[in-house]
């Protein structure tokens, strides 16, 4: 069992940290929002008042933060100069697992800086949504050295079901970008299917039930069709975060020198959702944009 620092106890990090406590690890958590820390303490973990305090005794440091700037602030310190944060306060040899979805370039920067100080660093973005985190069945796409991946497996086994090493540092983020363009595109098409069926006056619920049994079956149809039909859009996964992810996917396409036209279209629909003020809603709220387009 390991001493774990867990930084970022939000929608995903909260339940993941709880599973690690229940698996017998000593988990010390930190979040800028105290409610997340309180939840961890209630689950049997220990609260910390800063990154420095959380990581001081840790053998494994885990981060689950919204965006690149949060990961950089936590890893390098708020001034970005490398004299605060995880890199300054973690012991050499510590395994740093970043579960956040960020740009591949940022993961490579973190890994390079960490290795210079003797840390072992993995980018390990996840898929499966809040439900996947709560049920501990996340898919985890891992970039970094093979031996570090092997060392992290006991952690992945607690919070996930499917995990693969997909290459060196940053590779996990490329796979996550690919994941997010599929998820965004699927939501857009499920939304269009709902708008079409409702406009035509057919029973959309029965329609989605039968679609979910055929070739168009998907995890999204399985777990989201009822809430979409009921127009219940509490997150889940916020439009703001998916907007961030489509930016990562677009930049990744650019640096890989490929054209992803569907991704570009879905990115604009998600941008429209955000511009209309739906950033805090679940990404299934793409339905509201598709409805708008048809004046519904
Ligand atoms: P969230 O906003 O619910 O949680 C992030 C937490 O980080 C918050 O509690 C926030 O207070 C905390 N935080 C921010 N800056 C901090 C700092 N400097 N120090 C300490 N804590 C800080 O977000 P989430 O939904 O849990 O997502 C986290 C990451 O996981 C994102 O990169 C997201 O894209 C990815 N992700 C989310 C889902 C999902 O369904 N929610 C699914 C897969 C991947």
Image (tube, grey):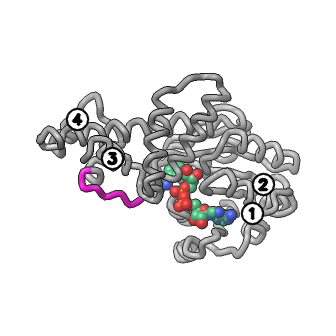
Is residue 136 visible in this depiction of the protein?
no
**Numbered mark located on residue 58 in the image:** 1
Relative to the observer, which residue lies in front, 263 or 60?
263
**Spot occupied by residue 95 in the image (x, y as percentages of width and height):** 74, 51
Spatial CA distance of label 4 from label 2 is: 48 Å
Q: Is residue 153 above or below residue 35?
A: above
**Spot occupied by residue 248 in the image (x, y as percentages of width and height):** 60, 40
Q: Specify which label sits upstream in the sequence, 3 or 1.
A: 1
- Tell me the crowding category of disc 2: few under 14, some 14 to 19, or many 20 or more residues within 10 angstroms, Cα based: many
Q: Is residue 282 above or below residue 211?
A: below
Q: Specify which label sits upstream in the sequence, 3 or 2.
A: 2
Q: Specify which label sits upstream in the sequence, 4 or 2.
A: 2
**Numbered mark located on residue 287 in the image:** 3
Residue situated furthest front in the rendering: 295
CB atoms of marks 1 and 2 within 8 Å: yes
Element at label 2: loop
**Numbered mark located on residue 94 in the image:** 2
Q: Quadrant of the N terminus?
A: bottom right
**Spot occupied by residue 166 in the image (x, y as percentages of width and height):** 62, 32
Rendering quadrant holding ligand 1: bottom right
């Amino acid at each position: 069992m390991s001493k774990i620092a867990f930084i970022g106890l939000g929608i995903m990090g909260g339940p993941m940290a709880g599973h690690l406590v229940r698996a017998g690890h000593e988990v010390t958590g930190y979040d800028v929002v105290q409610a997340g820390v309180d939840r961890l303490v209630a689950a049997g973990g220990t609260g910390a008042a800063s990154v420095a305090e959380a990581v001081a005794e840790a053998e494994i440091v885990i981060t689950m933060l919204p965006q690149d700037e949060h990961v950089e602030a936590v890893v390098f310190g708020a001034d970005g100069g490398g004299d605060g944060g995880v890199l300054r306060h973690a012991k050499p040899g510590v395994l740093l697992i970043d579960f956040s979805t960020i740009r591949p370039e940022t993961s490579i920067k973190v890994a390079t800086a960490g290795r210079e100080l003797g840390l072992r660093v993995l980018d390990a973005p996840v898929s499966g949504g809040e439900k996947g985190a709560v049920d501990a069945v996340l898919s985890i796409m891992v970039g970094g050295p093979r031996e570090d991946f092997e060392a992290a497996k006991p952690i992945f086994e607690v919070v996930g079901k499917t995990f693969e090493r997909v290459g060196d540092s940053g590779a996990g983020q490329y796979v996550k970008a690919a994941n997010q363009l599929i998820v965004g595109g699927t939501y857009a098409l499920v939304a269009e299917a709902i708008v079409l069926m409702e406009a035509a006056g057919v029973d959309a619920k029965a329609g989605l039930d039968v679609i979910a049994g055929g070739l168009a079956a998907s995890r999204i149809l399985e777990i989201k069709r009822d809430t979409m039909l009921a127009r219940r859009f509490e997150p889940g996964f916020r439009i703001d975060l998916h907007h961030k992810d489509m930016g990562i996917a677009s930049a990744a396409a650019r640096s890989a020198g490929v054209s992803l036209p569907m991704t570009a279209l879905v990115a604009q629909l998600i941008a429209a959702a955000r511009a209309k003020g739906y950033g805090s809603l679940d990404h299934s709220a793409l339905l509201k944009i598709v409805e708008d387009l048809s004046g519904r």
